[in-house]
Amino acid sequence: MLPGFGLPVNHVPQKGDPEYIDDLYCSALSPGNLYHGFINQRLTTLREFTMMQLMNTITDKPGWQIKVYDPKISYKWKEEALSSGKDISSKMVDWCIDELRYKASLIPDSAPHPPPIVVYNGDVVKSDYAVSPELKIELQNAVKAFEDKIPEHLKDWHPDSDEKVLDLVHPSLYPLVYGLTRVLPDGQITTLDDCIQRSGQGSKSIDNPRGIFGPYRSPYSAKFQWLPCEVDISGEEARITSYINNLHPQEDKPLYKLISKLITVSIPLWNLTMAPLRKGGWGGSLFLHSPRIHYNKVVYDPDPANWPEQEGPQPDHEEGEDRDDDMYLQRRQAWIESTRRIVLPEPGVFKPLPSPPPFSLKDKYGARGLQVIVKLANIELTPDKPEYNGGSWHIEGQMNEHIVATSIYYYSSSNITTSSLSFRQQCWSNIDYDIDYPVGSDYEWLLDIFGCERNEPTVQFVGSVMTPEGRLLTFPNILQHRVEPFKLEDPTKPGHRKIVALFLVDPNIKIISTANVPCQRADWVLNADSSSARSEDGFPITEDAAKDLKLELMEERKEFAVNHGIAFEAMTISLCEH
């Protein structure tokens, strides 16, 4: 039995259940994690974000792990940072250089390249060397062959993208549809060899299970679920054992081999990304990284609040004011707030910060395997359509998929300006017990120090990571992310950016996968000359029906993304008057 087939869609294994492995990992998809603060990072100073962004920039440089020890080069980096116009001090740069030297010291001398590196708390991890140049070229060639098979009139352009985003393999096409999709009974699974021939076998999944959710808006879909493939990670190499939805298991075998390799090289980065997640739910929490900059007291210099009353505005006796008059006190307070200057915090001397305990997907789940949702997509620009306007802030999937982390490989970029992926985090809202601040102020220090305002959302912009060709990037589903705008570098020629995205299902829960769902595509079944090719009760699903269902799914998820964004920003900075 699986959620949506024999079990409620919102079923989560509990201690004592035969399928229980461990509590689910933290995810922003979970209302409990979202509303009870289990995904909250500590409130981080803007200056610390600047430090992380500087270290991210430096580690983009080839050979940074060697150059960081060269005094001339590190001095040049420092001068560039101090003259950048950003709010950055000498002490901040010194800490960054020392931290990077420390990280470089952990790299074995025999290593030809630096290992994957955590660039933002959460953890966001990048590597330009995890995927070999040979694998990149193989992937480029294999996807090109896959693209060439698609007639122009059958290209699947993403809705509302103005034919700029091309979905090559998308989980929203032929997803699990509750009440329509056939699921095999317990103990039976499909293989890459028989998944098409067995089309139509099994029983329908739960039809319209909306009633189980109660009166509140649900993070679950009552109609759809993306279908992951099963991945065996017990050996040295990951091995896909059930079909990738919308990627033919026989005709597209070369891509299966390459995507398996991508999963293999993604696992070490996922290990780093997932290490801080710990367990969600009651009593669960994130591993919170220690701050590089501690901020526990608001200090002003100058601070006219402590000056003699002879300084600043005086009572207007002609207007009948005296020193106890409300109008005079208001004028004086306004003068104080316009005159004083917040003292910006500095880091101390660098010392290594604690790291989360090591984590290994293979050690914990090698015998169980992983479930991975696969997507291939292109952003294609032309002289007539030369700009991509960027995406919106979002979390991946809905609770049906239980996505816990994402891996994106940027395998091909041509004739485009710098592209990047940005992140933002939800933070703890109550800071009364952490910071000594003056009573009765307008709390402008919140904006100066943290970029937040009183009674406004506890959401902070973390930073961006550039996404050049060849980069592998992983991040957890506790951070919102957004693709930033880019355009053609040479506006007279076409350009593109192509990705493979891998969405990791929380390995502590099994959801309905392609191992449980024989092929749903009528075109695959027809081409296999199977007797089950005839459509009965809307199954197998025709291409036209699949496109209609995809549009319906995407409209539902668009609405969910809006509502989830509101929930993500629902917590606000809480301050009291002591």
Image (cartoon, rainbow, N blue to C red):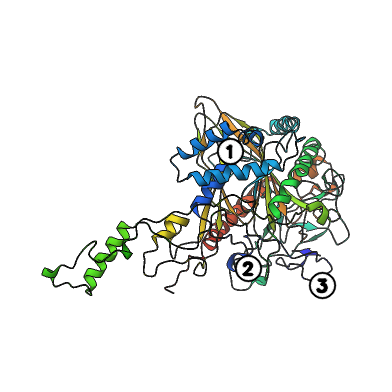
| Amino acid type, label 2 | Gly
* Precedes in sequence: disc 2 or disc 1: 2
Q: Can residue 38 be seen in this view?
A: yes
Q: How far apart are marks 2 and 3 (CA)?
A: 21 Å
Residue matched to label 2: 32
* Precedes in sequence: disc 3 or disc 1: 3
- Residue 79 image label: none
Residue found 50% across the figure and 63% down from its top: 296
- Residue 58 image label: 1
Q: How far apart are marks 3 and 1 (CA)?
A: 49 Å
Q: Is mark 3 on a helix, strand or loop?
A: loop
The residue positioned farthest toward the right in the image shown: 187
Residue found 59% across the figure and 33% down from its top: 496
Residue found 78% across the figure and 57% down from its top: 182
Q: Can residue 170 be seen in this view?
A: no
Residue matched to label 3: 16
Q: Is mark 1 on a helix, strand or loop?
A: helix
Closer to us: 32 or 188: 32
Residue 239 is situated, as x and y percent measured from the top left of the image, at: 83, 45
* Precedes in sequence: disc 2 or disc 3: 3
| Amino acid type, label 1 | Ile
Q: In which quarter of the image is the C terminus?
A: bottom left
Q: What element carries label 2?
A: helix
